[in-house]
Amino acid sequence: MWTRAVGLGAVRLETQSNNVAACRFYQSYGFALGGYDRFLYREIDPEKQDEVALFWYLKLL
């Protein structure tokens, strides 16, 4: 895995709460939900009031 080759200890990614398929995919590969931001998308696009940013983490080392 290239992440280990360059010495990364962990990976963080972000997805929207309404992307259930992505959330299940990340969880199946060992990512753990580590946080959320209720306001991130609201600030980017006012029409996305109900979407929540989810932050997933995978420890590599």
Image (spheres, rainbow, N blue to C red):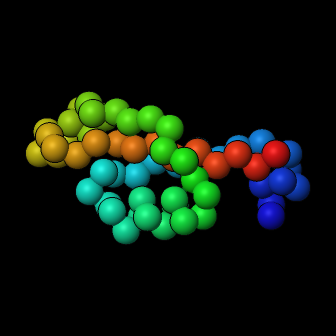
Q: Is residue 36 visible?
A: yes
How many marks the image carries: the answer is 0
- Residue 3 lies, in percent from the top left, at 78, 54
The C terminus sits in image quarter: top right
- Residue 8 lies, in percent from the top left, at 78, 45
Q: Eyeballing the image, is 41 above or below 20?
A: above
Q: Is residue 44 visible?
A: no
Q: Is residue 47 left or right of residue 32?
A: left
Q: Residue at x 16, y 44 (%)?
A: 50
Q: Is residue 25 left or right of residue 45?
A: right
Q: Residue at x 76, y 49 (%)?
A: 60
Q: Residue at x 35, y 42 (%)?
A: 53
> Of 47 and 31, which appears nearest the observer?
31
Q: Is residue 45 left or right of residue 33?
A: left
- Residue 34 lies, in percent from the top left, at 50, 38
Q: Residue at x 23, y 46 (%)?
A: 51
The N terminus sits in image quarter: bottom right
- Residue 2 lies, in percent from the top left, at 80, 60
Which of the 4 image quarters holds residue 57? Answer: top right
